[in-house]
Image: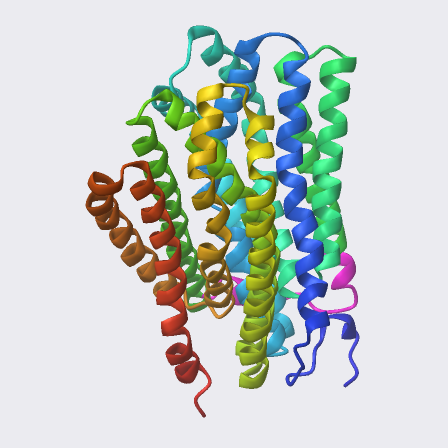
Amino acid sequence: MTTQSSDIRPEKAFDVTHRSVLAIAVPMTLAFLSTPLLGVVDTAVIGRLGDAALVGGIAIGGVIFDLVFTTFNFLRSGTTGLTAQAYGADDQSEIKATFLRALFIAAVAGLAVILLQVPFLEIGLTFMGGSADVQSATRRYFEIRVYSAPFLLANYAILGWFLGLSRAGTGLFLQLFLNGLNIALSIWFVMGLGWSIEGVAAATVLSEAAACLAGLLLILRAARGSVWPMWSVVFDRRLLLRMMAINRDIMIRSFSLLFAFAFFTARSADQGDVLLAANAILEKFFLVGGYFLDGLATAVEQLAGRAVGARYRPAFDRAVKLTTLWGFALALCLALVYFATGPLLVDLMTVSPGVRELGRVYLPWAALTPLFGVLAFQMDGVFIGATWSRDMRNMMLLSLAIYIAAYYTLFPLMGNHGLWLSLEIFLGARGISLAAMCRHRANQTFQPA
């Protein structure tokens, strides 16, 4: 097959191998792990100034932005799934149209965040609380960083597009460029120029803008010599509504997941400050494990989406099998590491004797979370790539209901052990329910036309 843009044109039938899985999973795992490193550096840089209110301000500001931008994280995953399907179908026009639609949504949403920054900030501060000094620092941080919104959301779309084309190396480059530049600018602006918390916020705005520009240039290079679709194709009502429906379902799924962990934190707080601190530290074990498992989930997003677009069932089945195999292997390794090093990690994260003691008591639950959660991660990737978003949304809501019911049944009997067991049940229910539905949906999707 010859074409001017052969670098993004696949054959419809393709093989899924261990190598093709790892070629996506490894770079994206490294990319995802660079994100928490940025948060650590920003906090450490501000911490060097010796003002606790500034540390609190950047922490609360970060949470507010996380909540706002979670609304739009479908721009990454949804774009990956739709692009992968167009790639598998060898539909060059739709590959580009998918990106332009996502970029349009990112621009509109980013401008909306800027225009609505005052209510977003006030609601966030009311919800999060904090002293007057902390809230003042949060305002200073928020009022600068908010202008990163259009660039950040565009970067979601850009990353999703490259991942949909199986270009994980480009995705890794963009994430390392973004986070590396952000780290360098934060250190320079705060430690070198003395800009305080405003320096961290400005570093984020500039690095998001630079990464956006770099990503757009790489996209233009990838599509060089090919024809971009007409605006009538980009804004085709049926396809635009389809993207919006998928994005809506992913958004509901994301907020349900946020609620589940907020519920865990709130029920921990009900049991006192010491137990809240212990649970919060142990919860980080699961969150860090999630960054490792996300790389494999991203791999199956692309491979499953490409197989659906190509209508090639063998590749789909092979992608599900291999990514699940690798996922459980990695989850087992993480669990063993947590069991072996968990007490040391808890001690590194707190000096409180009471928190350390409780951390050791409940450590086994935290160590098991990768094994309970791995199937949910993998199935999320399958359903996003195949754009079975309605089923993913519904199974998330079902699992959330099971989680709440489990808590009110188990907590009176087992206390904090019951809270942790309820969380494990929630994770397992998500994975099992999606896996049970996966074959049925695959049979429907790949049935002869």
Q: Which residue is drawn at 64% across and 53% down?
A: 159
Q: Can residue 216 be seen in this view?
A: no
Residue 388 shown left or right of residue 222 in the figure: left
Residue 159 is left or right of residue 372, and the answer is: right
Classify 127 as above or below 36: above
Q: In this view, does 374 lie to the left or right of 195?
A: left
Q: Which of 293 and 4 is in front in this view?
A: 293
Reply above or below: 96 against 313. Answer: above
Q: Relative to 20, is 278 above or below?
A: above
Give me the residue at 20% from left, 47% from top.
409
Image check: 132 left or right of 294?
left
Q: Examine the structure image and report whether residue 224 is included in the region drawn in magenta.
A: yes
User: Where, quadrant-wise, is the N terminus in this rendering?
Assistant: bottom right
Question: Of 149 and 299, which appears nearest the observer?
Answer: 299
**Quarter that holds the C terminus:** bottom left
User: Image point 41% across, 84% down: which residue?
Assistant: 443
Q: Where is residue 395 in the image (x, y as percent from the top left)?
A: 33, 61
**What's the residue at 42%, 58% (across, down)?**
244
Range of residues picked out in magenta: 219-236
Query: What x and y, as percent, mark residue 233?
Result: 53, 67
**Residue 72 sits inside the magenta stretch:** no
Q: Give residue 187's position: percent from left, percent from top.
A: 74, 21
> Residue 15 falls in which quadrant of the image?
bottom right
Residue 110 picture location, percent across and down: 52, 39
The answer, for residue 345, to whether it is visible in the render is: yes
The image shows residue 191, relative to residue 335, as above or below, that is: above
Q: In which quarter of the image is residue 52?
A: top right
